[in-house]
Image: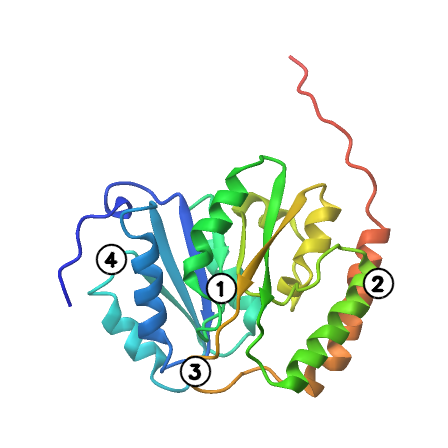
Amino acid sequence: MAEQSETPHESGPPRVSVVVPMRNEQGNVAPLVAEIAAVLDGREAYELIVVDDGSTDETATILANLRATYPALRVLRHAASGGQSAAIRAGVYAARGGEIVTLDGDGQNNPAFIPLLLQTLRGDPAIGLVQGQRIGRKDTAFKRWQSRMANRIRGAILKDGTRDTGCGLKAFPRAVYLRLPYFDAIHRFMPALVRREGGVVALVDVVDRPRGSGRSNYGFWGRLGIGILDLAGVWWLIRRKRPTPGVTEIA
């Protein structure tokens, strides 16, 4: 591999923190890290935070070896799997950048869309979330069907104006995320929760890809009941939100 040239993240604090949750993705780690670096090196002052969510394969070892090649790479590790939302949360809390970009660790989210997400985020200070919306889904027919049903039900109840909240490609100010109530699966309800806080949600179409290798860590039937409870909980949070009054400091 050719020696990497000096990049913005080496000369100062990062503006952007890319957070990638991973669990048992040994076949996808190196290609995905390389893709992200190729997109951002020389273009953004960034850091790449990969959160190993208690992997039991060689994910941790591969990540440790990659740090010598990619100076922007930081690795966090959960002692046991806490789930995707917990991994994202750990990455955001550790982030030094004021702008956060997230994407899934299975290779289906194309890092080539990161610049577009950041451009959209920076286009309007009122934007609290840029949500990717997948087109050309590469999942199985059953998984596409379950996503359509879940999105229709969620949209009808929460009226969040988003047809695909499950897409891992997101960009948002770190400060906005830190104001949101945390619970497991929060990443699937971020558009509704950002709107609850008065933020604008911008939607960007992104082209889906097949999974790089391995298989999904998340099943349908196991989380169905939990998903219904989460939906009810988010509906309750939105209903209980009172308008936030303006604040002025008295001299």
| Mark 2 element type | helix
Give the class, few, some or many, for how many residues have Cα within 10 Å of label 1's Cα (few <14, many ≥20).
many
Q: Mark 1 points at which residue?
A: 103
Q: Tell me which amino acid carries mark 4.
A: Pro
Other residues around mark 2 within 10 Å, as few (<14) / some (14–19) / many (≥20): few
Name the residue rendered at 49%, 69% in the picture: 104
Q: Looking at the picture, does residue 24 appear above or below residue 193?
A: below
Q: In which quarter of the image is residue 242?
A: top right
Q: Distance between the residues labelled 2 and 4?
A: 45 Å
Query: Label 1, label 3: how many angstroms apart (C-alpha)?
Result: 16 Å
2 and 4 marks in contact (CB < 8 Å) = no
Amino acid at the residue labelled 1: Leu
Q: In which quarter of the image is residue 77?
A: bottom left
- Residue 86 lies, in percent from the top left, at 55, 67
Q: Is mark 1 on a helix, strand or loop?
A: loop
Q: Mark 3 points at which residue?
A: 24
Give the residue pinned by disc 2: 156
Mark 4 crowdedness (10 Å alpha carbons): few <14, some 14-19, many ≥20: some
CA distance separating discs 1 and 2: 26 Å
Q: The residue tagged with tag 4: helix, strand or loop?
A: loop
Badge 1 vs badge 3, beta-carbon distance below 8 Å: no
